[in-house]
Amino acid sequence: MQSPSPYSVRVLPHVSIQCLFIISPLALSTASTLTGFSEQWTNTAKASKSTGLPGGASQSTPSSAISLKPTSAVGKSGPAISFEKTVYDLGDVGQSTKNTCEFRFTNTGQAPLKITNVRRTCGCTVFQLDKKECAPGEAGLITVSYTVDRSTGLREKHIYVSSNDNEHPNLKLTIKARVVQLISVAPEKLQLFPREPKAGIPDSKRLDHSKT
Protein backbone atom coordinates (compact mmCIF):
# COMPACT_ATOMS: atom_id res chain seq x y z
CA MET A 1 0.00 0.00 0.00
CA GLN A 2 1.46 3.39 -1.03
CA SER A 3 1.90 6.16 1.57
CA PRO A 4 -0.15 9.32 0.95
CA SER A 5 1.53 12.37 -0.69
CA PRO A 6 2.42 15.21 1.70
CA TYR A 7 0.26 17.63 -0.38
CA SER A 8 -2.79 15.42 -0.82
CA VAL A 9 -5.65 14.54 1.46
CA ARG A 10 -8.09 11.80 0.69
CA VAL A 11 -11.09 13.49 2.26
CA LEU A 12 -10.73 16.93 0.61
CA PRO A 13 -8.05 16.75 -2.03
CA HIS A 14 -9.04 20.14 -3.57
CA VAL A 15 -8.17 22.03 -0.34
CA SER A 16 -4.43 21.35 -0.55
CA ILE A 17 -4.31 22.30 -4.23
CA GLN A 18 -6.11 25.62 -3.63
CA CYS A 19 -3.79 26.47 -0.72
CA LEU A 20 -0.78 25.99 -2.95
CA PHE A 21 -2.16 28.38 -5.60
CA ILE A 22 -3.20 31.02 -3.01
CA ILE A 23 -0.07 31.07 -0.85
CA SER A 24 2.48 30.93 -3.64
CA PRO A 25 1.57 34.26 -5.39
CA LEU A 26 1.43 36.05 -2.00
CA ALA A 27 4.85 34.77 -1.04
CA LEU A 28 6.31 35.85 -4.38
CA SER A 29 4.83 39.35 -4.06
CA THR A 30 6.18 39.75 -0.52
CA ALA A 31 9.64 38.63 -1.53
CA SER A 32 9.69 41.04 -4.46
CA THR A 33 8.66 43.93 -2.22
CA LEU A 34 11.37 43.16 0.35
CA THR A 35 13.97 42.92 -2.39
CA GLY A 36 13.03 46.35 -3.80
CA PHE A 37 13.05 47.95 -0.37
CA SER A 38 16.50 46.49 0.34
CA GLU A 39 17.89 47.91 -2.92
CA GLN A 40 16.40 51.36 -2.17
CA TRP A 41 17.89 51.37 1.34
CA THR A 42 21.31 50.44 -0.05
CA ASN A 43 21.22 53.27 -2.61
CA THR A 44 20.19 55.78 0.08
CA ALA A 45 23.03 54.74 2.36
CA LYS A 46 25.55 55.16 -0.47
CA ALA A 47 24.24 58.63 -1.27
CA SER A 48 24.45 59.65 2.38
CA LYS A 49 28.12 58.68 2.52
CA SER A 50 28.96 60.64 -0.63
CA THR A 51 27.18 63.88 0.35
CA GLY A 52 27.46 63.73 4.13
CA LEU A 53 23.76 64.65 4.48
CA PRO A 54 20.85 62.43 5.57
CA GLY A 55 19.08 60.77 2.69
CA GLY A 56 21.62 62.07 0.18
CA ALA A 57 20.24 65.61 0.27
CA SER A 58 21.95 68.06 -2.04
CA GLN A 59 24.13 70.82 -0.57
CA SER A 60 23.22 73.31 -3.30
CA THR A 61 21.03 76.27 -2.34
CA PRO A 62 17.58 76.38 -3.95
CA SER A 63 17.29 78.83 -6.81
CA SER A 64 14.41 80.65 -5.08
CA ALA A 65 16.63 81.44 -2.06
CA ILE A 66 19.40 82.89 -4.25
CA SER A 67 17.06 85.39 -5.87
CA LEU A 68 15.91 86.89 -2.54
CA LYS A 69 17.48 90.28 -1.68
CA PRO A 70 17.00 92.24 1.56
CA THR A 71 15.15 95.51 1.17
CA SER A 72 17.69 97.37 3.30
CA ALA A 73 20.55 96.40 1.00
CA VAL A 74 18.79 97.98 -1.95
CA GLY A 75 18.18 101.25 -0.06
CA LYS A 76 21.88 101.64 0.87
CA SER A 77 22.87 101.94 -2.77
CA GLY A 78 21.57 105.54 -2.82
CA PRO A 79 22.31 108.53 -0.58
CA ALA A 80 21.36 108.31 3.11
CA ILE A 81 21.43 111.15 5.64
CA SER A 82 22.04 110.23 9.27
CA PHE A 83 22.05 112.78 12.14
CA GLU A 84 23.88 112.22 15.42
CA LYS A 85 20.83 113.70 17.15
CA THR A 86 17.57 115.19 15.90
CA VAL A 87 16.58 116.77 19.24
CA TYR A 88 18.79 119.36 20.98
CA ASP A 89 17.84 120.31 24.53
CA LEU A 90 19.37 123.60 25.68
CA GLY A 91 18.10 123.16 29.21
CA ASP A 92 17.56 126.30 31.30
CA VAL A 93 18.26 129.56 29.44
CA GLY A 94 17.83 133.18 30.48
CA GLN A 95 15.36 135.65 29.10
CA SER A 96 16.29 137.48 25.90
CA THR A 97 19.44 135.38 25.50
CA LYS A 98 21.05 134.04 22.31
CA ASN A 99 21.80 130.32 22.28
CA THR A 100 23.64 128.16 19.73
CA CYS A 101 23.20 124.46 18.95
CA GLU A 102 24.75 122.15 16.33
CA PHE A 103 23.28 119.27 14.33
CA ARG A 104 25.93 117.02 12.76
CA PHE A 105 25.03 114.58 9.98
CA THR A 106 26.81 112.01 7.79
CA ASN A 107 26.10 110.53 4.38
CA THR A 108 25.95 106.82 5.19
CA GLY A 109 24.82 105.86 1.67
CA GLN A 110 26.76 104.92 -1.46
CA ALA A 111 25.83 107.95 -3.60
CA PRO A 112 26.34 111.72 -3.21
CA LEU A 113 23.95 113.39 -0.75
CA LYS A 114 22.38 116.73 -1.71
CA ILE A 115 20.66 119.06 0.77
CA THR A 116 17.92 120.68 -1.29
CA ASN A 117 16.31 122.89 1.36
CA VAL A 118 16.49 123.92 5.01
CA ARG A 119 13.41 125.61 6.43
CA ARG A 120 12.75 127.30 9.78
CA THR A 121 9.38 127.88 11.43
CA CYS A 122 10.21 130.93 13.51
CA GLY A 123 12.14 134.15 12.98
CA CYS A 124 13.85 133.63 16.33
CA THR A 125 16.00 130.86 14.80
CA VAL A 126 18.80 131.46 12.30
CA PHE A 127 20.59 128.48 10.71
CA GLN A 128 23.81 128.05 8.77
CA LEU A 129 24.56 125.02 6.53
CA ASP A 130 28.28 124.42 5.96
CA LYS A 131 27.83 122.37 2.75
CA LYS A 132 25.01 121.36 0.42
CA GLU A 133 26.62 118.18 -1.00
CA CYS A 134 28.36 115.33 0.81
CA ALA A 135 30.17 112.40 -0.73
CA PRO A 136 29.61 108.89 0.71
CA GLY A 137 31.04 108.84 4.23
CA GLU A 138 31.42 112.64 4.37
CA ALA A 139 29.98 114.66 7.29
CA GLY A 140 28.18 118.00 7.41
CA LEU A 141 26.98 120.51 10.01
CA ILE A 142 23.92 122.69 10.56
CA THR A 143 24.42 125.43 13.15
CA VAL A 144 21.30 127.04 14.63
CA SER A 145 21.18 130.25 16.64
CA TYR A 146 18.07 130.59 18.82
CA THR A 147 17.15 133.88 20.53
CA VAL A 148 14.47 133.50 23.18
CA ASP A 149 12.01 136.20 24.25
CA ARG A 150 11.35 137.56 27.74
CA SER A 151 8.46 135.26 28.63
CA THR A 152 9.31 132.29 30.80
CA GLY A 153 8.36 128.64 30.28
CA LEU A 154 9.07 125.76 27.93
CA ARG A 155 10.00 126.40 24.30
CA GLU A 156 10.19 124.09 21.27
CA LYS A 157 11.30 125.17 17.80
CA HIS A 158 11.75 123.13 14.61
CA ILE A 159 14.05 123.09 11.59
CA TYR A 160 13.12 120.99 8.51
CA VAL A 161 15.84 119.51 6.28
CA SER A 162 15.05 118.24 2.75
CA SER A 163 17.49 116.07 0.77
CA ASN A 164 17.66 113.48 -2.03
CA ASP A 165 17.51 110.63 0.51
CA ASN A 166 14.69 108.43 -0.82
CA GLU A 167 13.92 106.86 2.56
CA HIS A 168 14.01 110.14 4.55
CA PRO A 169 13.46 113.03 2.12
CA ASN A 170 12.30 115.36 4.94
CA LEU A 171 13.68 115.32 8.47
CA LYS A 172 12.61 117.43 11.44
CA LEU A 173 15.16 118.86 13.88
CA THR A 174 13.86 120.01 17.26
CA ILE A 175 15.28 122.61 19.65
CA LYS A 176 14.02 122.57 23.23
CA ALA A 177 14.59 125.09 26.02
CA ARG A 178 13.21 126.20 29.35
CA VAL A 179 13.26 129.97 29.72
CA VAL A 180 13.77 131.00 33.33
CA GLN A 181 14.13 134.36 35.10
CA LEU A 182 17.74 134.60 36.15
CA ILE A 183 17.42 138.00 37.92
CA SER A 184 14.37 138.94 39.97
CA VAL A 185 13.39 142.50 40.84
CA ALA A 186 10.93 143.45 43.58
CA PRO A 187 8.63 145.09 42.95
CA GLU A 188 8.42 144.13 39.32
CA LYS A 189 6.63 147.41 38.42
CA LEU A 190 7.31 150.90 39.71
CA GLN A 191 4.85 153.74 39.05
CA LEU A 192 6.80 156.95 38.62
CA PHE A 193 3.85 159.14 37.64
CA PRO A 194 1.03 158.73 40.18
CA ARG A 195 -2.48 158.99 38.86
CA GLU A 196 -3.91 160.60 42.01
CA PRO A 197 -3.04 164.20 43.00
CA LYS A 198 -0.03 164.21 45.31
CA ALA A 199 -0.38 160.40 45.43
CA GLY A 200 -1.67 160.59 49.02
CA ILE A 201 1.34 162.57 50.26
CA PRO A 202 0.38 165.05 53.07
CA ASP A 203 0.84 168.79 52.52
CA SER A 204 4.31 170.00 53.25
CA LYS A 205 5.10 173.18 55.14
CA ARG A 206 7.63 175.65 53.89
CA LEU A 207 10.08 176.78 56.50
CA ASP A 208 11.20 180.40 56.65
CA HIS A 209 14.88 180.36 57.51
CA SER A 210 15.15 184.13 57.54
CA LYS A 211 13.58 184.35 61.01
CA THR A 212 15.96 181.98 62.56
Image (cartoon, helix red, strand yellow):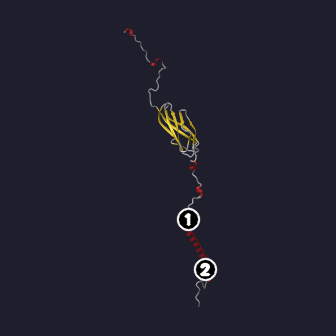
Please provide percent x and percent y for residue 50.
54, 66
Q: Please name the residue shown 56% across and 50% down the image.
A: 73
Please provide percent x and percent y for residue 183.
44, 30
Circle 1/circle 2 CB separation < 8 Å: no
Please provide percent x and percent y for residue 121.
56, 35
Of all residues shown, which one is farthest toward the left? 212
Disc 1 versus disc 2: nearer the observer:
1
Say which amino acid is labelled 2. Leu
The quadrant where residue 119 appears: top right
- The one of 190 and 127 positioned closer to us in this rendering: 127
- The one of 33 and 79 positioned closer to us in this rendering: 79
Residue 56: which disc?
1
The quadrant where residue 29 appears: bottom right
Element type where label 2 sits in the image = helix
* N-term-proximal mark, 1 vs 2: 2
Element type where label 1 sits in the image = helix
Residue at image mark 2: 20
Please state, as top left, top right, bottom left or bottom right, where the C terminus lies in the image: top left
Up/down of 186 relative to 13, above or below: above
Apparent side of residue 203 relative to residue 69 in the rendered image (left or right): left
Say which amino acid is labelled 1. Gly
Please provide percent x and percent y for residue 200.
45, 19
Neighbor class of circle 2 (other Cα within 10 Å; few <14, some 14-19, many 20+) is few
Up/down of 164 relative to 206, above or below: below
- The one of 55 and 4 positioned closer to us in this rendering: 55
